[in-house]
Amino acid sequence: MAPVELRLNGLCKRFRDVVAVHDASLVIRGGEVLALLGENGAGKSTLMRLAYGMVRPDAGHIEIDARRVRFDAPRDAVAAGIGMVFQQFSLIDTLSVRENLALAWPRAPWWLGRDARRPGALDAHLARLVPGVDPRARTGDLAVGVRQQIEIAKVLLREARCVILDEPTAVLTPAEAGALHARVRALARDGFAVVLITHKTADVRACADRVAVMRAGRVVGEAPAADAADARIVEWMVGVAPAPAAARPARAADTPVRLSVRGLCAGPVRDVALDVHAGEIVAVAGVSGSGQVALAEALTGLRPLDAGQVTLDGQALRAPGRPARPVAALAAIPADPRRTAIAPSRSLAVNLALKRLAVQPWRVRRAALEEQARAPIARFDVRPPDPRRPAGTLSGGNLQKLVIARELQGDPTAVVACYPTMGLDVVATAQVRDAMLTLAANGCAVLWFGEDLDDLLAHAHRIVVMFDGRLVADLDAHTATPQQVGVWMSGHAIAPDPLRQAA
Amino acid sequence: MAAADALLTGLPVSTLRGATPLLFVLLGECLTQRAGRINLGVEGQMLVGAAAGYGVTALSGSPALGLAAGAAAGALLSTVFAVLTVAVDADPFASGLAVWMLGFGVSAFAGTALVGLRIDGWMPWAGGITPTIALALALVPVCGFGLLHTRTGLRWRAVGESPEHARAAGVTPWHYIVAGVLVGGVLSGLGGAALSVDYTRTWAEGMTAGRGLVAVGLVIVARWNPWLALPAALLFGLAEALSLRLQAADSAVSAHLLHTLPYLASLGVFAITCARLRRRPGGGAPAALGALLAR
């Protein structure tokens, strides 16, 4: 296979009034792993979508092996040997693994046989790239890490020479991420060009040859990975030298229990017991799909309890059959706020008042709501700061800030935050994190469901790990290591179930 | 004993005869839904198929030409649904109802000219099987293998599961959606023609009597699987044959109530299937159908 050279020359792309990519140039070479870093909204995903033909550039052009090409659709890019693995996988959950591969295979014969079993090449390909997976398995039933491997296998099946991975490690455990890094290195060794879109410097250290950093739609820095220190990369990404993160607030020894969970079962969550004390930050870690989102939903009232109970300062908060009303004392920051935490077609002012509907006068005056909205909007720097704007038009980060602004009104005594910094840029992340640290310092109990282990370990007092719907570990965050937590996350540390063994 | 004999003699063939029009429609709607659209207009497509089939058979004297005309009429009417839901992106349920009403009106209007015409239809082969029955039975493996064993079928299903993901795999979704709707149109038109040309050998306004809508429901019973369309259609045919025989045997139950038997049987199986699907979600439903309902 001849090593490919893909050149992006002066690409520009606007989406209405937003400049997503501005005059970005980049060279991607075979045999090399390029880490493309940048904040959310820096344009790195858009740049790669341009290279994959999903978006057409307003200006600039693309060259492959010094020949100018034009991609009108991903099909053209695929034909030119470019493959992309998205964060949201393009596998169809209800089809089998083999059928998903057959769907993407340009040389698939017309007669496939039941469950696409006739072309044996598919099974051989699968056995080579994803050993151990059952080709007949329903794709949706497989773990995220395995599905990602299948996705990569699918891209290679289409004879890609350049593989673009969009934030591949965001959904993986540390061990799975390690395996991915090894796979990426192996691809580069075989002559493939690999682009790794990421915002983690750990990915750079693990497998990149070269680093390119984007900010505000431009490529602002490029260097061999060995020459780019982490601090320099972050400075490129943010534009200023990073401020040291605030330390976790010290905690008095014997503070009372605020949020107490006993025997909680709800959907995939099984028999969870947990206490969060005043002034304490407890982090909940787990591989995606281990039940942590369901636990957060049960605590915040989005999911009915099957059994158990939850109390806040001794008052019953949740129980089976108990109506889930919003409680001022509990700040609930759910995952996927666009879907679960706002009324998208209503204004910012109405969304900020949602938790206080019961105390509004019978005739609600819009002007009064808008007046009340100004302070929280200013406090969390929601942009644009227009109380009349429909909440659904906000960007992801600003939407998250809006939800947090609403939930932190009225001095809560406990916070349940599910991935509160997901999709936020460095500045917004710091704001959200500092808000939670301040709350804890003032005696609030904070339960923080997070995805970035380093972040959780740096700021929480305790870290609990979920696996398969249960709490499997309760560790002191001051002494726990990411590796230790990772082992619990993968479920390998669990002793075999004696009952199952007997059976 | 004699009563039981009258009830049971030739029951398998009667069942097949009653099931055949429904089987065409069921297969067609199954393929339409697998491409991600629910077409309630099949009732109207059946009606225009029945009217066109009957008219052409009466004029030409050839039942085969009649079936072809029915298929063409069904396909023509289904293009209205295809244009509405694909090109204009209109709501599929409202579009289906519109197509139904259109088909009802057009067939009633054209049908006034058919009243009083007589047709001979096919002489049954040995055992009472007619070419229509044979064609319907032959279409089951064609659809079954085509959908589940070929590349075309795989792409067809992928579009029904997720048009976005199918597009990412290099498939053009609207090609398959339009094909799904048109195949549904051809087969429901054939079903209508089979009803008027071969089964009842008459034309009456609104003669399909809800068979098209029954087919939409039975697709769920058949788990969107062409192979299972056969038992689902046979069940309806059996209930219909029984109800006709009970009427002929001067049953004490009112004929009007007996007429509802096939529909009651379908409803019963439908309820049982849906209750089971609640326990085991999905059950083969194309995911893009759920997206239609959720939006």
Image: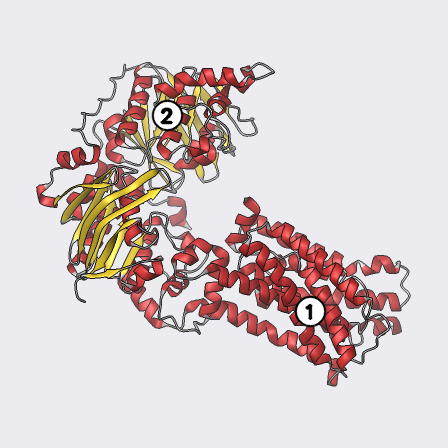
Q: Work out whether residue A500 or residue A421 is closer to the camera in this orientation and state it.
A: A421
Q: Amino acid at mark 2?
A: Val
Residues tagged 1 and 2 counted as in contact (Cβ below 8 A) = no
> Which corner quadrant holds the N terminus of chain A?
bottom left
Q: Position of residue A280 (x, y in %)?
A: 32, 20
Give the left or right position of residue B65, taking residue A41 as reference.
right
Chain name for mark 1 = B
Q: Tell me the SS state at disc 2.
A: loop
Q: Which callout, 1 or 2, points to the residue nearer the camera?
A: 2
Number of other residues with Cα within 10 Å of mark 1, as a class: few under 14, some 14 to 19, many 20 or more: many
Q: Which mark is residue A382?
A: 2
Q: Amino acid at mark 1?
A: Gly
Number of other residues with Cα within 10 Å of mark 2, as a class: few under 14, some 14 to 19, many 20 or more: many
Residue tagged 1: B191
Q: Tell me the SS state at disc 1.
A: helix
Give the left or right position of residue A254, taking residue A219 as reference.
right
Chain name for mark 2 = A
Q: Is residue A264 visible?
A: no
Q: Position of residue B33 (x, y in %)?
A: 57, 59
Residue A339 to residue B92: above or below = above
Q: Residue furthest bottom?
A: B126
Q: Work out whether residue A465 or residue A493 is closer to the camera in this orientation and state it.
A: A465
Q: Quadrant of residue B138?
A: bottom right
Q: Residue furthest front?
A: A59
Residue B256 to residue A344: above or below = below
